[in-house]
Image (spheres, helix red, strand yellow):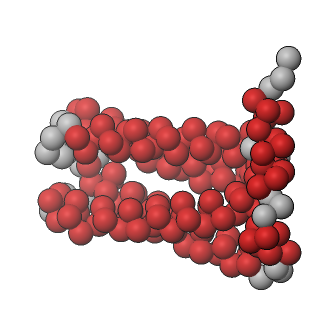
Amino acid sequence: MTTPIQTIAPVLLAFEKLPFIVWLKSNALVYPALETIHITGIALVLGVMIVVDSRLLGLHRKLDLALVKSVLLPWVLVGFSICATTGLLMFASRASDLIANRAFVIKLILLMLAGTNAGILHTRGKLDDADWTTKMQALISLLIWLAVVTAGRWIAYT
């Protein structure tokens, strides 16, 4: 029986032979630069999410919730866009290795969970820090984002 990884491996190997990807892999400065920019995006996402989610959990009540939402949440999208762009480029240079890396797969699953949780939270209506469901989603959000960072770090060691 053929595994999904065995099925997709030839496609990924062909993709990795594209001239841009070969250049990306062979340039000694590009990958470390991408990692640095990726970590900057992670810091932005995680830093803002800690403030937003802790506010939703009822901490930092001096911060106006509407202001937190309108001023800080757009920065999560900026950070996530940075991470997605650099992450895709880093993936492109090591696609066949990463697709078989358990920590990488776990990270992708966690990112989907984070996005689903955020989508549900922000489509339920007005954010209300007195609502029990909002508090649970904020706690789940914090835990998921910390797990994303942890899984991301484990990619290098698995």
Please state the horizontal and vertical placement of residue 83, each as a whole percent of the image: 54, 63
Q: On the picture, is 128 further left or further right than 144?
A: left
Answer above or below: position of 122 versus 4. below
Residue 154 or residue 10, whichever sits in front: 10
Q: On the picture, is 23 further left or further right than 56?
A: right
Residue 91 or residue 19, whichever sits in front: 19
Residue 152 or residue 131, whichever sits in front: 152
Q: Quadrant of the N terminus?
A: top right
Residue located 67% across and 40% down the image:
105
Q: Quadrant of residue 9?
A: top right
Residue located 69% across and 46% down the image:
104
Q: On the picture, is 127 further left or further right than 14?
A: left
Residue 41 appears in view: yes
**Disc count in the image?**
0
Residue 62 appears in view: no
Residue 112 or residue 91, whichever sits in front: 91
Answer above or below: position of 133 versus 63. above
Please state the horizontal and vertical placement of residue 73, each as a whole percent of the image: 30, 61
Q: On the picture, is 38 further left or further right than 18?
A: left
Please state the horizontal and vertical placement of residue 151, each as a whole percent of the image: 66, 47
Residue located 33% across and 51% down the image:
53
Please state the horizontal and vertical placement of residue 6, each as a whole percent of the image: 83, 33
Q: Quadrant of residue 47?
A: bottom left
Residue located 78% across and 48% down the image:
12
Q: Quadrant of residue 131?
A: top left
Q: Residue furthest bottom?
A: 29
